Image (cartoon, rainbow, N blue to C red):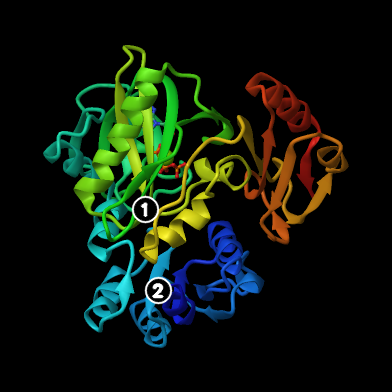
Amino acid sequence: MFNQIRNLKIGILGGGQLGKMLCLAAADWDLNIAVLDPDPNCSARTYCKNYTQGHFNDYDTVMSFGQSLDVLTVEIEHVNTAALRDLQKQGKKVHPDPALLELIQDKSKQKKWYVENKIPTERFDFQYFKLSKPSHYPMIWKAALGGYDGKGVALLKDESDFDKMPDVPFLLEHLTDIDKEIAVMVARNERGEVVTYPPVEMVFDKEANLLDYQLCPALIDPKTAKKARQLAENIIKKLNLCGLLAVELFLNKKGELLVNEIAPRPHNSGHHTIETIETSQFEQHWRAVLNLPLGNTRLLSPSVLLNILGEKGQTGIAQYENFDHVFQTAGAHLHLYGKTTTKPFRKMGHLTVADKSLEKALEKTLNLKKILKVTT
Ligand SMILES: Nc1ncnc2c1ncn2[C@@H]1O[C@H](COP(=O)(O)OP(=O)(O)OP(=O)(O)O)[C@@H](O)[C@H]1O
Ligand SMILES: [Mg+2]
């Protein structure tokens, strides 16, 4: 089986940092990877065997990219699924399934699916259009399509906030009384094997609405952790999804778990797995997509993950200030994404700090966070 896998031509739609890290994992097994991305300076470009410049949203581009390939997968869900469906009809293996990508691309379809499948999620009102105003505030406004890294989400405090929103399809969600934000990675292969990863706890930067740092394991009671993993397992089984799935959850102040959203690919909340879980999310993605037995998800060490973001007010060629301190910190592992230019809050890399004690790992991370800066 492995000899057949080694002969496969495998394509990834998208060549950002997730694509790069998928390529690095694939390199361990000498897999033959092609990447499609519009940016010729994309993170994955120099880590794949073949790079094609073009947009993964364009039907013709995806069709012609897929012609010479046997297997297609994604590092981003916003891709042209009509082309993936047609490639699938030609006999190409496409994981995750294009129908699932379509479901996940549209947040209003995602929410309906949770309700139909009795998956706990925050209450919401179906798609409003600008004509019909919300009946009460505060509410969370979410663009149905194309949201990413918090950019399609807004808190509406009153009607004037609502009036500022763009005229695109959206849904309105009730505000969750969030105690913690949790994420669980789960993987499934064609044979139906499923593995889940230990839940992580995400702490957000309120201003940028981006992950600030993340703790693994999450500081939640074992019962809640078990429930979160069961929920993730239930979702991936119900979807019949082959590949990786990130399940973002809210733990509300009543102690209930609510599914916020899912992402069918490697995820920011799984980056620590490279160093601190027996099988990294990137290796697991290949195991799942290529129908190999799934790898063990045993925790090797607690860790804190810090996103390295472009400094506010700085746009241009990136300079890494004070990064020598990373190498003087035991347990700290640096990953830069190969982006030459920085802009405010752009994800330039991440840092995983592993330590026997989660508290110690957090202390080390916060010390580094104070001094590490990406400027111009
Ligand atoms: N119903 C809600 N109540 C309170 N806060 C919310 C709610 N929905 C979303 N948020 C906040 O907004 C953040 C971003 O929301 P969401 O994950 O749906 O958007 P996104 O654009 O897909 O973000 P990302 O790509 O960063 O995951 C959440 O992590 C959470 O902090
Ligand atoms: Mg999210």
Disc 1 element: loop
- In the rendered structure, the answer to whether residue 240 lies left or right of residue 67 reads left
The residue sitting at 26% across, 34% down in the picture is 172
For this view, does 362 lie left or right of residue 277? right
Q: Crowding near pointer 2: few (<14 within 10 Å), some, many (20+)?
A: few
Q: Nearer the viewer, residue 122 or 69?
A: 69
Q: Is residue 104 visible?
A: yes
Q: Label 2 near label 1: C-beta < 8 Å? A: no
Sequence-wise, the earlier of marks 1 and 2 is 2
Amino acid type, label 2: Met
Find residue 120 and report its horizontal and vertical position in percent.
Answer: 22, 29
Name the secondary structure under disc 2.
loop
Would residue 78 be seen by someone viewing this image from the given angle? no
Q: Residue at x 28, y 55 (%)?
A: 241
The residue indicated by pointer 1 is 264
Q: Amino acid at mark 1?
A: Pro
Determine the residue located farthest toward the top in the rendered image.
Answer: 254
Residue denoted by label 2? 1
- Ligand 1 near label 1 (Cβ, under 8 Å)? no
**Horizontal and vertical percent position of residue 278:** 55, 44
